[in-house]
Image (cartoon, rainbow, N blue to C red):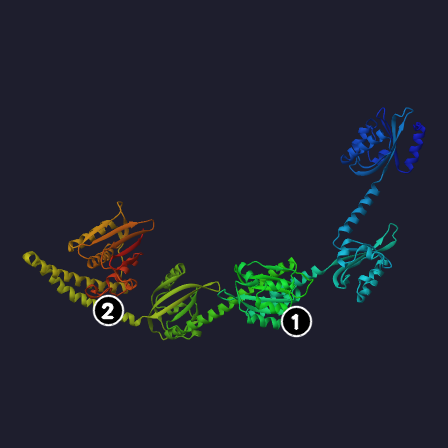
Amino acid sequence: MSASIPGDGDVRRYAFAMEAASIGAWDWDLLTGQVWWSDNLGEILGVERDPSKETLDGFLHVVHPEDRDRVRAAISQTVETGEDYLAEFRIIGSDGRTRWIQGKGRVIRDETGQAIRLLGISTDVTARREAEDARSLLAAIVESSTDAIVVRSLDGIIMSWNPAAERLYGYKAEEMIGRPIDSLIPPDRHHEFEENLEQVRRGERAPAYETVRLRSDGTLIPVSVSVSPIIDESGRILGAATITRDDTERRRAAERLQLLAEASRIFAEKTHDLESTLRAIAAQLVRVIGDGCIIRLLSNDGKWLLPAAVEYTDPESTEFTRKILESVVQPAAEGLTGQVAQTGEPLFLPEVEPAEMMARLRPEYHEHVARYPTYGMMIVPLRARGRVIGTIGLSRLQPGRPYTQADLTFLQQLADHAGLAVDNARLLGDAQRAEHRYRTLFESMADPIVVFDTTLRFLDANPSALALLGWSWEELSELRLPALLVAAETEVMEEFSQLRRDGRWNGEVELRRRDGATVPVEVIVNATELSGETVYLASCRDITERRLLRHLQEDFLAMVSHDLRGPLTVIRANADLLRLRRTFEQRNVATILSQVDRMDRLIDDLAGVVQVETGGLELNRESVDLPALIRHEVELIQSRTDRHNVRIETPSSPVACLCDTKRFAQVLQNLLENAVKYSPDGGEIVVRLEENQTEIIISITDCGVGIAPQDLPRLFERYYRAGDGEQASGLGLGLYIARMIVEAHGGRIWAESTLGQGSTFTITLPRD
């Protein structure tokens, strides 16, 4: 059945009527493709009319790209099926603004049933769509909000109840809608409801305030509540929206922050008292997140976990637990606590049945669990300077209150603070004990000791120093070091410059006593750090008697040398004459010369000791060809004996060293003579010369009787003679002097030996 087609006059009359109702009309000629718009349709669409573009494509051009295919499909379906056209879509106006348009249309067919026109109207529904979107958004916000949102009438009847309200209060929406809201308010808080209701009736918003509300199980919840009036378009107050936020976590977080602040204060104030510090922390932890707290510290040897603090919610539990812990020896590697101490990882049992807890614990603690069932446990490590020094454990003695990950994180944070406090307390105790030991040692030292700073002002002096100098500490503290030294201040400052550079100085100085007398002292000064400042400790020793003895030794040795060398010179001269005149007396002459050489060496040794010990060992360094020097000394020793073979192993390339030729030759002579002396007839002696990037190495190996192990450590001591009988002849000074000469060159000397197989003496010298 075909619909009648209105004429142009009819369409215009329809258009006039629709314009008054803000409805735009359009007429699409399906045969020509032309689209007629009413005069107000362009205004409704927000586009400027252009008759040349009033086609279907022109219309679709202003449709939002995301809606264009959907509108085209709806139009096509209407034309094909004859169903009425209905669509809502967005238009992008000439001003760039997006509008929502509702389009309705109907197909007009001719007598044959062919669709020839599509008539329709379009209405701007932007305001409605925005309102619907706003309502949808508001509904989504309400539904997804983590805050409980409850809408109530002015008489307090609940009208809506979001999912967050179900979670907070424990009631379903169907249980609460239609009920009075005061069922959620404790009786002692009803005045809050009445005050809020009065504010709402005045159209005022009640600012957020903290209070408590009742859950379905009768427990109280700490909450933050704000109330706002609901007002319609006419300004009429319809009811109130109550937004309630669970404050449990916030208040718990505030308590934790307060506990951390309190812990920091306690740690700062009670560092000297470790025991009371830990007890105070345990008490705070029990109050905030735990029913019981046990703090353990590792013993100094790391083998045991010792109870340091015990705190429970009631004193009886505390005392019982403390007795249990004191009666149990807890190895550091056993049990749940030992596991945490060994691994450094926390133990987290938020919910556990007492029977399971019993199975996890060592048998010694079963009595405690039987008396105080445990439903949850956390144990975290106490750390300091990267190592575990103890543990903090918390336990729940009531079901239904599991620990959370936030509880564990907080406990570890506090444990980190506590670990530092424990370490600081221990360090303070160690420092106090060390200071006591130092003071005791300092005061009791027989040697005078003074302490001075970089300005050369005295900071401390022990009784021995005050007795030596004759000053009281009050007098000495007002003086500077140069005032006590006989040397000129310029000389003192030069030595002090060396001290500041090297951190150490030693030597002999003259000190001026309070009575004006002088006293010679040997001084060793070392730099050290004290409270971040450089100070100097000077240890002194009165060497008045030593100097007197030294002078006597020098006089004696000079006399001995003079008295011995005169006759020796005569003996040597006559022996040489005998050797020239009578060849058959060569053996006797050789004996005379050997004894002369021996006496000469003894004299050289005595003189060498004096030089070493009086600081008179001076080195005349020059570049020495070591292979040549070694060959020369070997030739000398070979000229005196035909009973031994001395083999030399040296590098093919030259080896030079800055040394005192005479002194170093003395060392080689001593070692070669010892090798010959202690090697059997026909034995081989090997002299090796090697070098690496940092050192020159000389070794002399014999095939003699060897040196006893007990003799090796003392071999280079003054007057020490290894062996016995004939082999123990001499003054025991040769190796001592050799060591002094080598060390004066910056080198080292040592011996290695196996009894019955020989000995090796090794010298190292630094490369130039």
- Viewer-closest of 754 and 415: 754
**Is 135 situated left or right of 707 in this image?**
right
Quadrant including the N terminus: top right
The Cα atoms of the two marked residues, 1 and 2, are separated by 83 Å
- x then y, percent, for residue 41: 86, 34
Number of other residues with Cα within 10 Å of mark 1, as a class: few under 14, some 14 to 19, many 20 or more:
few
Pair 1/2: label in front:
1
User: For residue 265, which quarter of the picture?
Assistant: bottom right
- x then y, percent, for residue 144: 75, 51
Kindly identify which residue carries mark 2: 553
Kindly identify which residue carries mark 1: 314
Q: Amino acid at mark 2?
A: Gln
User: For residue 356, which quarter of the picture?
Assistant: bottom right
Q: Amino acid at mark 1?
A: Asp
Number of other residues with Cα within 10 Å of mark 2, as a class: few under 14, some 14 to 19, many 20 or more:
few
- x then y, percent, for residue 505: 37, 63
- x then y, percent, for residue 184: 80, 61
Q: Secondary structure at mark 2?
A: helix
Q: Residue at x 13, y 65 (%)?
A: 567
**Is 542 situated left or right of 255 in this image?**
left
**Callout count:** 2
User: For residue 528, which quarter of the picture?
Assistant: bottom left
Q: Is residue 89 above or below residue 192?
A: above
Residue 360 in view in this figure: yes
Q: Secondary structure at mark 1?
A: loop
